Image (spheres, rainbow, N blue to C red):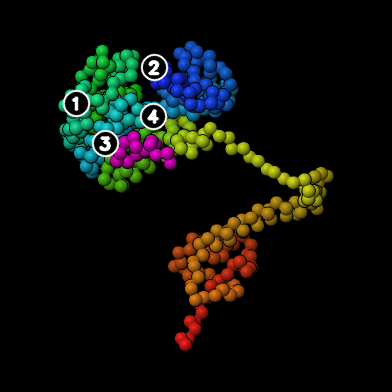
Amino acid sequence: MKPSEISRNVERLVAETLPRYLDKDCFAVVTAGVEEITRLLENKFDYIFFTGSPSVGRIVMTAAAKHLTPVTLELGGKNPCYVSDTCDVQNVAQRVAWGRFFNAGQTCIAPDYVLCSVEMREKLLPALREAIAKFYGPNPRESPDFARIVGDKQFRRVQALLRSGRAAIGGQTDAEARYIAPTVLVDVQQDDPVMQEEIFGPILTVASVDDAIAFINARERPLALYVFSSCKKVVNRVLERTSSSSFCANDTIVHMTLTTLPFGGIGQSGLGRYHGRFSFETFSHPRSTLLRGVGREALNAPRYPPYAPSRLPLLRATTETKRRAAAINAYFRFRLRFEPAPPSHARPIAAPLRRRPAQSTNLLPIFPPPSLPQRPPTNRKRVWRRLPRPPSP
């Protein structure tokens, strides 16, 4: 395990805590810089899981390719957020502001920019200002809930992005405290750095576009895509006509907290998936296993040389027939699961299977497909016939 050298406190905590509570023979914590990690990647690993930037992800994947080592890359990118004209502006502003400024925007799935119409932008900006004041007070610098940038190098990079566009909300900075106020930028250009690189800071850009789907598809596939709309048709249209690692409608970030959903990148945002049972599948190898006995060698005779045309029917019978029989058995087992319960005053009698009416809700027809051989009914396949009630005494 290699924690990020940028977060020194987390790196030190992991290096001290894991050996105290876990088996030292099962893992090793490496605290090193770029040069040491570069030499470490020259070794042959069974699997590499990397979380970081796309540029470093390419380096990791190149090193792994020399040994044909499989990898999972959880990278990042620009996460768009489309806000339609049919939505509750106050709710949208709160959910977008929380997702963008949580941990001072230092999350890989935070919404990077908002796409909306000019009319919606005029409504959304005051709502965002109100939501920020509600979360962090009139002065976010004094709020215990608003984080700081993790390092000086990262602070200078995020601070340089403020030169793009115009700050409609916030924009204040403090280099000594590594503080950047929750900021909303408008009037940005598509080629501005703030619209080209992942922000990873408390800056949100709001842009007005005519075709949000075309705008999104013209860029790299993001790690997360957000849509806010009270119209299901709008949500489904964006979902069907775009491609992203994950999709969340009318909320932000919370989809990552669901362990029942796989999480991972696509294209520029990474590859592979994990979370919950998907993490076990990622770090597991499904090993195909067949265990046979050593008897019944006569069944194997058709596959041994010398070969002759006379053996072909027998060979076909030992292969295709088994598959067809298995298909028939699976079909009848599936059908029995959906048989309706018998009436309380009925008793089973042997009778041929009959086709149900057309309005039946049974998931499968009574008879198997024509391609499968018909099997006569047995005692296990019973049809319930309604009998007259006995006369009252």
Q: Give the Cα distance between marks 3 and 2.
A: 31 Å
Viewed as shown, does residue 369 lie left or right of 252? right
- Of badges 2 and 4, the one in the foreground is 2
Return the x and y of residue 144 as percentages of the image width and height. 24, 25
- Of badges 1 and 4, the one in the foreground is 1
Q: Residue at x 18, y 24 (%)?
A: 139
Ranked by sequence position, the earlier of labels 2 and 1 is 2
Local secondary structure at mark 3: helix
Ranked by sequence position, the earlier of labels 3 and 2 is 2
Res 74 → quadrant:
top left
- Of badges 3 and 4, the one in the foreground is 3
Viewed as shown, does residue 271 lie left or right of 77? right
**In this figure, which residue is indicated by the disc labeled 3?**
95
Q: Nearer the viewer, residue 127 or 187?
A: 127
Q: Residue at x 46, y 27 (%)?
A: 73
Q: Residue at x 47, y 14 (%)?
A: 32
The three-letter amino acid code for the residue at tag 4 is Glu
Q: Give the Cα distance between marks 1 and 4.
A: 28 Å
Q: Give the Cα distance between marks 2 and 1.
A: 32 Å
- Of badges 3 and 2, the one in the foreground is 2
The three-letter amino acid code for the residue at tag 2 is Arg
Local secondary structure at mark 1: strand
How crowded is the residue under tag 1: few (<14 C-alpha within 10 Å), some, or many (20+)? some
Q: Give the Cα distance between marks 2 and 4.
A: 31 Å
Magenta part of the chain: 246-260
Local secondary structure at mark 2: helix
**In this figure, which residue is indicated by the disc labeled 4?**
220
